[in-house]
Amino acid sequence: VTGATTLTIDRLPITLTGGSNATAPYTYNGAEQSVDAYTVTLGAPAGSDRIASYTHTDGLGNTATDVCDRAVELSAVTLQNGNRYVTANYEVTLLPGRLVIQPLTVQSGLSLTGETHVYDAGEHHATLGDVLTTSIGTYSLSAATTADGATRFAVRYTATPQGGAEGAQSSVNPAFTNVTMQTVKAYVTDATGNFVILPAEAGVSVTPRDVTITPDSLTVPYDGLTHSITTYARPKAAMENGVALGLTGLVGEDDVTVALRNNGPFVLPGAYPVTWDDPAVMTTGRSSNYRFLHATGVLTITQASGLDLSLTAEDVVYDGLTHGYTALPQVPENTPVTLAYQATDGSWVEITPESPLPAQ
């Protein structure tokens, strides 16, 4: 009796999976970081067989420096026993792993300096320093480039007025001329994705400029006429290249009018303080750019000088008639005069100029 049997040796299953750090991602640190090239996740080489070599799919290796979230993928595996290749004895399954490098969050890495200035018709803005400071080094915002030579960092700004909403982002640093209070934010993005840079903010304020409005002063002697003050001083600031110097005075072509109070007309001697009433009204420019301060002028009417009174006594031979004195005042032209004499009872009796006084 004869017979035959067939011996079948099946290939041994083995599964290799690329390394992974998905459950504990790395943070970007500027250096190369890696996971295991692979792990054997099912089965194992038999006996003294060993995994002799492996290759990764191009671009999907187990090392990286920049931020990423990608597969770690084996493309080929070779098993050997001594110098003998035994890969054909295995049913090899290759599964991808995962390499994750998250961006480094940079807090307080930007230097944004605000500005407070009195209104001067110039432009005022926050200033962003060029240095980005991180836990792994410093970088120039303007000079740093990506691997292909492109600009690495992009800067954009927003402005938020006091009590208002944040404006749209712009690549232009906002500048302010008129009186305002603004919060400026600088947003910096990293083209490599390796940094998440928290924005910096700073205040920019343009404050009102002081202008003291002073009614003019006038001193005149009493002359019987009416006198008033109708003018006032509002100082102008010196200008240089369109920007006002100093901290006070009207800027450029700006001008203002006010209504004077207690400015006349007055006739009688005295000192009359002259002020002005709010509001001051701008004829050119914005009133919100100024703080108008009150000062006082004085209209002074002094007592008239150069007054004289002559009394001329009659010089006659007795003739039985009434005789006395003649009073003649000498005063500036148009000056009204009242003359009186004191009677024997102490009272005063008015007379007209050139009238005879009582008989003596």
Image (cartoon, rainbow, N blue to C red):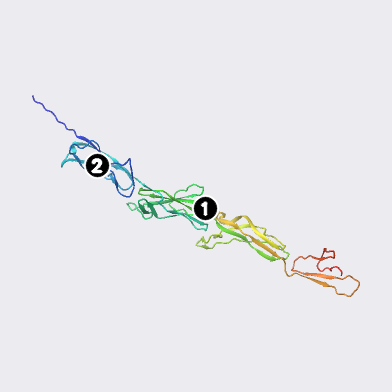
Query: For the view shown, which residue lies furthest in the top direction?
Result: 1
Could you tell me which quadrant the C terminus lies in? bottom right
Mark number, residue 114: none
* Placement of 178 over or under 51, stated as above or below: below
The percent coordinates of residue 330 (x first, y second) are 77, 70
CB-based contact (under 8 Å), mark 1 and mark 2 = no
State which quadrant residue 50 falls in. Answer: top left
Q: Earlier in the sequence, mark 1 or mark 2?
A: 2
Side of 73 where 198 appears, left or right? right
SS category of the residue bearing label 1: strand
* Residue 186 locus on image (x, y percent): 43, 51
Say if 299 sits above or below 108 in the image: below
Farthest residue to the front: give it. 345
* Residue 206, x across and y down, in percent: 51, 55
Does residue 297 appear left or right of residue 157 in this picture? right
* Residue 75 - label: 2
- 183 relative position to 318: left or right: left
Instruction: Residue 324: give x, y in percent of width and height.
Output: 85, 70
Residue type beneath disc 1: Thr
Q: Residue at x 57, y 59 (%)?
A: 211
Residue wearing tag 1: 180
**Badge 2 element:** strand
**Three-letter amino acid code at disc 2?**
Ser
